[in-house]
Image (cartoon, rainbow, N blue to C red):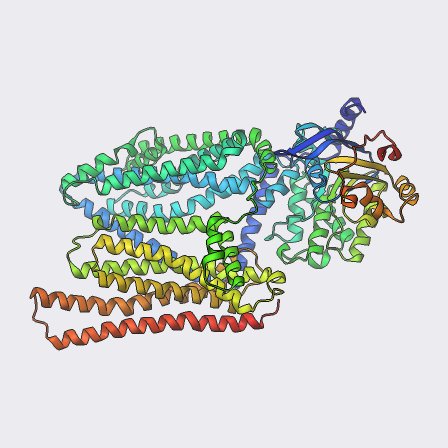
């Protein structure tokens, strides 16, 4: 047979191109915008109709966070303004701005690259778009704009209170506030464009090494940031907030003020606007907009050439075989943990799902990693680890932060487990095991999985704060109570209020049941920590006063505080038992009677 | 209308499509059969532009799907096995989106949507969000979207899975009507009875190679000489039936009888 594509094909082509209209680029863009607006409107309508409580909670918490940050920044700028030399104030503000935006520059390059990788190559709608006569550049832009939006909301939440606070404290003219948004949008496009270019280039030219490249670059970036943070805190000399300390810190962050960095253009432009230099402000804005447009255009051009071939190449990339033998950790659980066989198998299944879902372990890693970094640096932020009240207060605050973060993670990952399992009930429901076994295995998975990192974090915090051994033991027991209780609440409520319609864990967590779980968990953490922390705080304070002879505390007051210390701990244990077993009991009853 | 010439596609070391050559002319319904993993979906993905061949060419209405991907998509309608619909859009909004990106103006969009609504009986759920649809409703909407622009070529992957008997009947009648009007339909299916009932020609693929190609009558003549229905004939030809390696591939010019030698 002759290869097709001769004269007949040419004739068919011209006939074809006449019969079907070609969509103009502007119409295509309009169709995408209309589709996006309609989807967003439907989403908002649904939120108002179904999740008002959650929406209100998010709005209130976001406002509180924003207001808190605004107050913090405003106080910081006021403090700096009171420094004797205006030069120091200007230098410090310029350094803070440059450093903040330089950090955002790097983070936005990473976040946009990673978000786009998922959005361009692994979502179902891209498969639809690539089979429609849509310009490949438009399909790319559609995903690019979404990634910019998702990647930059945190930037706006963090950046806006700082910039507004600075403007108000510094008495900036009206146009400072007018140019804020164009500046931020133009700046965001530059790292987003760079991230997009990197994403396209890696997938198109090095598809086999994409994961390795991401890991290497990520490790290098985290390593460099950690080294820098370490040198900034431990490498600085003398007492904090002294002129020498300022000079040292400013020297260390000098690199962020390189004039070729877009973050410096943003920083310099906003400072010029705040100081009333209108022309300089417009100059830097023009520079940012021009570079943003170039970045966007280069990314679009690259997408036009690379996106479709890269997509096609990635789809046919062979998936690695995992081999027939279970991993060493699974073998340990399967052979050595003294539990019924069915429960061990369920535990190993959940462990495998957790390991193979980067969304889950990466969030654990990010949150707990940041906390570990903070705990390891805690001495730099505090005043004196010999001051017993301060040490006690901070150690319990750290414990509650660990608990609160754990409560968000159990809401996001543990609470939806029962709903997701219910969707697979065609297999689990027909196994010769009691339904309770499924819930107990989930509970064990959650409690054991959360206790290990949490106790390690609390240990870090206590060691850095030089907390005495018996208080450390008390913290560890409180940590255990928190992990058991939070796991019990998440599993119990998850079984009592399953969402069988959704298959996305984030949506299940975002529903009413998930929101209730978050609120109950947060209240539980605060009550448990208060029950143990307050008596401990007063008791240690009284004991310290007595031994150091600051005040002559009466022995009966100390005995009374000792009683409250024990009573608080007993109450927290009782509350922990109630929070663990009561939701589990309700959940098990509901799960036993559940129809699928 | 659909031309594949010596198409090869691999996934690492695995050869999914191995030198496939075939054509589907205007006004023909072609049924593409084969066991799981035979290369049917890979072939379809190359036709619709989701994959590109390692070697060989795929043309839709004379347009190379690699070099003229966008133009080829303009003349093509595609319904995958599990169609994706934007879940926060209503059925009408989804149809409007596909019509607008295909270049139709407002009036023409409305006219074409009305025709599809009537054709696929979408009225009762057209203005609700697609996330609430059953599988059958989603499938009907996907067909409406794929046929909205009256394509020259329709490519469908397992079109009858999950549909009730009435919907299957509706679809089969619709296919025959479109074919009579000149459309080329390429249908991948495991439902041998559907293929036998409505296809003009049947191709059987195994291990990425075309091992049988013939008209419906030729298929019948083949199996009536030895088997009672298409099913044992299909199982004998493919490795599923006897556990042996796949038979050698057949060129379209060869007769069905010679293909089995």
Q: Which residue is found at the position 14% from the left and 68% from the top? A: A543
Query: Horizontally, is A125 left or right of A297 in the view?
Result: right
**Could you say where residue B202 lies in the image, as x and y percent from the top left?**
83, 40
Say above or below: A539 vs A285: below
Q: Which residue is found at the position 66% from the left and 44% from the top? A: B98
Query: Horizontally, is B119 left or right of A152 in the view?
Result: right
Q: Which residue is found at the position 51% from the left and 71% from the top? A: A588
**Could you say where residue A31 lies in the image, as x and y percent from the top left?**
60, 42
The answer to whether any part of residue A531 appears in the image is: yes
Residue B29: which quarter of the image?
top right
Image quarter in which the C terminus of chain A is found = bottom right
Image quarter in which the N terminus of chain A is found = top right
Residue B177: which quarter of the image?
top right
Say above or below: A289 vs A465: above
Query: Horizontally, is A16 left or right of A261 in the view?
Result: right
Along the line of sight, which residue is nearer the eye, A107 or A422? A422
Outermost residue to the front: A335
Q: Which residue is found at the position 23% from the left and 70% from the top? A: A535
Along the line of sight, which residue is nearer the eye, A387 or A443? A443
Residue A232: which quarter of the image?
top left
**Could you say where residue A48 lies in the image, as x and y percent from the top left?**
51, 61
The answer to whether any part of residue A47 appears in the image is: no
Badge count: 0
**Could you say where residue B51 lies in the image, as x and y percent from the top left?**
65, 35
């Amino acid at each position: 047979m002759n290869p097709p594509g001769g004269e007949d094909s040419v004739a068919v082509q011209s006939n074809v191109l006449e019969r079907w209209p070609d969509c103009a680029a502007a119409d295509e863009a309009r169709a995408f915008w209309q589709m996006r607006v309609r989807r967003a409107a439907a989403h908002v309508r649904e939120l108002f109709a179904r999740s008002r409580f959650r929406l209100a909670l998010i709005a209130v918490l976001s406002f509180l966070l924003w207001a808190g940050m605004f107050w913090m920044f405003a106080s910081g700028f006021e403090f700096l303004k009171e420094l004797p030399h205006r030069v120091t104030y200007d230098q410090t503000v310029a350094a803070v701005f440059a450093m903040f935006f330089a950090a955002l520059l790097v983070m936005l390059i990473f976040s946009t690259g990673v978000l786009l990788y998922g959005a361009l190559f692994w979502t179902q709608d891209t498969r639809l778009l690539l089979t429609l006569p849509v310009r490949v550049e438009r399909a790319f832009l559609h995903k690019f704009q979404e990634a910019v939006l998702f990647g930059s909301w945190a930037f706006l939440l963090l950046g806006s209170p700082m910039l507004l606070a600075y403007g108000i404290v510094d008495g900036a003219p009206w146009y400072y506030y007018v140019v804020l948004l164009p500046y931020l949008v133009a700046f965001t496009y530059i790292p987003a464009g760079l991230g997009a270019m990197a994403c396209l280039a890696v997938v198109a030219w090095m598809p086999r090494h994409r994961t390795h490249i991401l890991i290497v670059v990520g490790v290098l970036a985290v390593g460099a940031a950690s080294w820098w943070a370490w040198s900034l805190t431990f490498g600085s000399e003398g007492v904090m907030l002294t002129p020498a300390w300022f000079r040292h810190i400013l020297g260390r962050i000098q690199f962020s003020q390189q004039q070729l960095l877009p973050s410096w253009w943003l920083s310099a432009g906003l400072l010029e606007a705040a100081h009333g230099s209108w022309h300089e402000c417009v100059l830097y804005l023009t520079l940012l907009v021009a570079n943003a447009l170039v970045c966007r255009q280069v990314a679009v051009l690259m997408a036009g050439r690379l996106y479709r071939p890269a997509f096609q190449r990635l789809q046919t990339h062979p998936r690695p075989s995992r081999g027939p033998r279970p991993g060493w950790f699974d073998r340990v659980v399967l052979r050595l943990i003294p539990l019924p066989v069915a429960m061990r198998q369920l535990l190993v299944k959940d462990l495998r799902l957790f390991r193979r879902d980067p969304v889950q372990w990466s969030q654990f890693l990010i949150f707990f990693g940041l906390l570990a970094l903070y705990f390891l640096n805690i001495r730099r932020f505090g005043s004196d680890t010999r001051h017993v009240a301060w040490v006690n207060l901070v150690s319990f605050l750290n414990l509650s932060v660990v608990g609160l973060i754990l409560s968000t993670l159990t809401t996001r990952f543990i609470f939806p487990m029962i709903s997701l399992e219910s969707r697979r009930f065609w297999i689990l429901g027909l196994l010769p095991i009691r339904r309770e076994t499924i819930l107990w295995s989930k509970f064990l998975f959650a409690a054991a999985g959360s206790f290990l990192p949490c106790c390690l974090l609390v240990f870090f915090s206590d060691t850095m704060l030089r907390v005495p051994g018996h208080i450390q033991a008390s913290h560890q027991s409180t940590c255990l109570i928190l992990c058991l209780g939070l796991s019990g609440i998440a599993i119990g409520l998850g079984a009592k209020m399953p969402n069988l319609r959704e298959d996305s864990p984030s949506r299940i967590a975002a529903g009413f049941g998930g929101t209730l779980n978050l609120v109950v968990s947060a209240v539980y953490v605060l009550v448990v920590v208060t029950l143990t922390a307050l008596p401990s705080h007063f008791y240690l304070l009284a004991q310290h006063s007595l031994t150091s002879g600051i005040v002559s505390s009466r022995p009966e007051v100390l005995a009374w505080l000792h009683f409250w210390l024990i009573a608080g701990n007993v109450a927290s244990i009782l509350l922990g038992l109630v929070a663990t077993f009561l939701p589990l009991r309700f959940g098990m009853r509901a799960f036993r009677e559940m129809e699928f | 209308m659909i031309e594949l010439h010596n198409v090869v596609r691999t996934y690492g070391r695995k050869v999914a499509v191995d030198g496939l050559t075939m054509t589907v002319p205007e006004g023909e319904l072609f049924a593409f059969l084969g066991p799981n993993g035979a290369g049917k979906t890979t072939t379809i993905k190359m036709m619709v532009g989701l994959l590109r061949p390692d070697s060989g060419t795929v043309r839709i209405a004379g347009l190379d799907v690699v070099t003229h991907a966008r133009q080829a998509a303009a003349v093509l309608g595609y319904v995958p096995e599990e169609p994706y619909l934007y879940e926060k859009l209503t059925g009408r909004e989804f149809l409007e989106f596909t019509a607008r990106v295909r270049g139709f103006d407002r009036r023409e969009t409305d006219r074409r949507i009305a025709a599809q609504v009537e054709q696929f009986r979408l009225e009762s759920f057209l203005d609700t969000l697609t996330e609430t649809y059953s599988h059958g409703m989603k499938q009907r909407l996907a067909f409406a979207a794929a046929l909205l622009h009256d394509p020259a070529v329709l490519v469908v992957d397992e079109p009858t899975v999950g549909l009730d008997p009435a919907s299957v009947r509706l679809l089969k009648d619709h296919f025959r009507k479109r074919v009579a009007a000149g459309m080329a339909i390429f249908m991948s299916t495991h439902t041998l009875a559907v293929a036998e009932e409505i296809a003009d020609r049947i191709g059987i693929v195994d291990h990425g190679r075309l091992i049988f190609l013939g008209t419906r009558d030729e298929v019948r003549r083949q199996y009536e000489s030895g088997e009672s229905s298409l099913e044992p004939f299909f199982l004998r030809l493919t490795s599923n039936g006897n556990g042996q390696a796949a038979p050698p591939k057949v060129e379209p010019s060869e007769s069905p009888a010679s293909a089995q030698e």
